[in-house]
Image (spheres, helix red, strand yellow):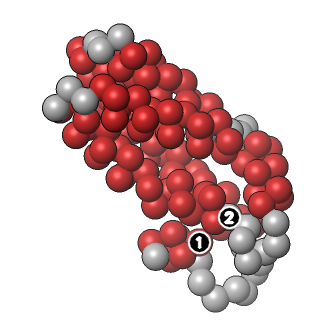
C-alpha cells in the first residue's frame, strides 16, 4: 500500500473493468469528479443541506472503498457521521483534511495509471484525466 491508495485493491478494480480501452476509466472519473464532489459538499454544508451532503459523502466513501483509498474513506466517514447528526461544527473539523487527502489520493491514482501505461504510448494518463 502506498500512503493513500492500496495498490492491490486499485489494480484489482482495474483488472475487473475489462479491456484496455475501458481500463482506468473509473479512476479517471474519480479524479475528474473530485473537485466537483468537494465543492458540492462545501456548498451543501454552507446552506445546511444535510441530505445533499449525505449523498456526496456516500459517493466519496463508496468510490474510495472500491479504489482502496482507505485514508480518504475513513475521513469521509468522519464527515459523514457528523452529517448524519447534522453537526455542522463536526463536519467542518474534518473538511480541510478531507480535501488534502483527496488531492493526494488523486495524485497517487494518476501515478498508478502512469505506471501501468505501456512504454512509448502517446498520451499520458494525466493528459487523459484532464479531458
Residue 125 shows which numbered tag? 1
Question: Is residue 29 positioned above or below 130 on the image?
Answer: above
In-front residue for pair 131/111: 131
Give the image quarter of residue 66.
top right
Q: Provide residue 10's location: percent of width, then percent of height.
A: 72, 48
As drawn, the label of residue 114 is none
Q: Residue at 79% of width from left, 44% of height from top? A: 8
On the picture, is 67 further left or further right than 97?
Answer: right
The nearer-to-camera label among 2 and 1 is 2
Identify which residue, 37 or 7, lies in the foreground. Answer: 37
Q: In which quarter of the image is residue 85?
A: top left
Residue 100, percent from left and from top: 39, 38
Q: Provide the residue designation for mark 2.
A: 24
Image location of residue 48, percent across then percent down: 20, 26
SS class of the residue under badge 2?
A: loop
Q: Depth check: 70 or 17 in front?
A: 17
Looking at marks 2 and 1 on the same chain, the residue that comes earlier in the sequence is marked by: 2
Secondary structure beneath label 1? helix
Image quadrant of residue 20? Answer: bottom right
Which residue lies at the image location 50% right of the left edge and 40% below the top edge?
A: 59
Res. 35 visible in picture: yes
The residue under the point 68% across, 64% down is 24
Amino acid at each position: 500500500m502506498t500512503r493513500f491508495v492500496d495498490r492491490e485493491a486499485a489494480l484489482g478494480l482495474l483488472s475487473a473493468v475489462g479491456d484496455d480501452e475501458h481500463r482506468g476509466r473509473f479512476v479517471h472519473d474519480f479524479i475528474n469528479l473530485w473537485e466537483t464532489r468537494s465543492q458540492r459538499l462545501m456548498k451543501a454544508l454552507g446552506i445546511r443541506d444535510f441530505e445533499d451532503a449525505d449523498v456526496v459523502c456516500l459517493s466519496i466513501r463508496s468510490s474510495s472503498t472500491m479504489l482502496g483509498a482507505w485514508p480518504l474513506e475513513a475521513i469521509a466517514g468522519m464527515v459523514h457521521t457528523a452529517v448524519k447528526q447534522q453537526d455542522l461544527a463536526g463536519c467542518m473539523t474534518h473538511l480541510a483534511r478531507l480535501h488534502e487527502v483527496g488531492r493526494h489520493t488523486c495524485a497517487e491514482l494518476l501515478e498508478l495509471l502512469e505506471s501501468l501505461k505501456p512504454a512509448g504510448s502517446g498520451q499520458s494518463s494525466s493528459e487523459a484525466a484532464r479531458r
